[in-house]
Amino acid sequence: MEKIVETHNLFIDTSTANKESNSRGDDFQLHLNTQSVDADRNQFIRLTLNDFSMYKTWTDVNDNNKTIIIDDGTGDRKVALTKQNYETLYDLALDFANVIGAAVVADSAAASFTITGLTPGATTGINGTTDNIIRFTINTNVAHGLTQYLIQLFEEEGDAWALLGGNRIYGTTPSTENSLKTTITTTAIKFECLYPAQRSTTSHIYLRTSLTTGSSETASLGQETDIDTAPEVSYSNILARIPVNTEFCTYTSNTGREYYLDLHQKHLNNIKLSLTDQHSRRIGRRPASFSSKTASGLNNQDAIDQSTLGNLNFSCVLRVDIVSGGPVNETNFQTTQPQIPVRKSGILVQTNRMM
C-alpha cells in the first residue's frame, strides 16, 4: 500500500527567464541545485501539477493558422489573414474576404472589388441562427479574365483549414486540389467554405516536461504534418492540458490525481517545463521559427524577446511527494510505474511529514 512519507510544494515562476540564460518564459529550465530530490529504497518521487496560470498573450490568428495558398492557374502564392483576435465570425469572414478580394485584383485585369453575400452576418452571434459557414462573392469592376482560382489550405502551412472551415490538403505545393468551393463568372467569383468556421484553433495548451512521464499521445499531438504516416499512439512528454480562455489560461487540481507522474529516476535536480499547442509547436510560431522568442507582437525587430524580456511566461505549483510502498499498480496515461526508490535531500519550500 502506498504511503506518502514527505510532501512539499514547489512554486515556479518563469518570468525570471532572460536573454543570457538558456531558459525562456515558455521553455523553462529549473535547476534545483542543493534542493535536489534523491531516491531511497522502496520509495519513489511523485510530481503533481496542483495549479497553473498565465495570461493569454498571443492572438487567436497567428503564424500557425494565418496562411492561405492561392493558385490562379499560372502559379501559386501565399496570402495571409491578419494576425489578431476576432470578436465574431463575421469579423473573421470579412478579413478573409478582403484578403481574397485584394488577391483577385492583383491577379486579374480588375482595378477594384466589392464584397457581397457575406456570411455569417454582422448581427449574427456565435450562438445565433446561422450555420457559421463562411460565404462571399468578390465582384470586380471589369471582367477579371480568370478561369481558375483555387484556395488551398495546406496542412504544411498550419491550421487555416480548421479556422476557416475548409478541406486540408496534404503534402506540399503545387496541387490541383481546392479547399473551398469556388464558382467563377465573368465579373465575379463566389467562395464557399465547406464547414463551420471557428475564431481560433487552439482550445488548449500543453505543458510538457523533460522527465519521463509514461504518458501516451496520438500522432497529431506529437507532430503537425505527415500525421497519416506516423504511429497512431506513441510515448509522450505531456504533463498537463490547460484550457485557453479569452484572457487567461488557468488550471487548478480538484483531486490531486488529474496530472501527475511517478518518476523512474532516483535523483531529481533538473526539470524542464515547456508550452506547446496541440501539434507540439511553440505557441504562435511555425516549426521553422522555433528559435523565435515571440508568439505575438509588432512585426518588426523591436518585438523579438517576448519570452525573455516580455510577457510570455507562466507560473505553476508542483507538489513533490515522496511515496513508499512500491510501484503503483495503476494504468493511467498521466503516470509512470515507478521502478526506482526515492529519498529527498534538501528542502525546496516546506516539508510536511505524514505518518
Image (cartoon, rainbow, N blue to C red):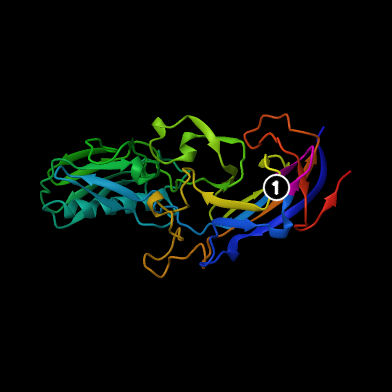
Residue at which label 1 appears = 267
Which part of the image, by quadrant, shows the C terminus?
top right
What secondary structure predominates along the stretch shown in magenta? strand
- x, y percent for residue 63: 39, 53
Q: In which quarter of the view is residue 331 placed?
A: top right
- x, y percent for residue 274: 55, 51
Asked whether 45 falls inside the magenta stretch, the response is yes
In-front residue for pair 271/195: 271
Asked whether 14 falls inside the magenta stretch, the response is no
Q: Residue at x 70, y 35 (%)?
A: 339
Q: Residue at x 78, y 43 (%)?
A: 40
> Does residue 306 appear to the left or right of 12 in the view shown?
left
Which part of the image, by quadrant, shows the N terminus?
top right
Residue 253 shows up from this direction: no
Q: In which quarter of the view is residue 195 placed?
A: top left
Which portion, as a residue range, is magenta? 38-47
What is the three-letter code of the residue carrying label 1?
His
> Does residue 313 appear to the left or right of 199 in the view shown?
right
Q: Residue furthest bottom?
A: 302
In-front residue for pair 228/32: 32
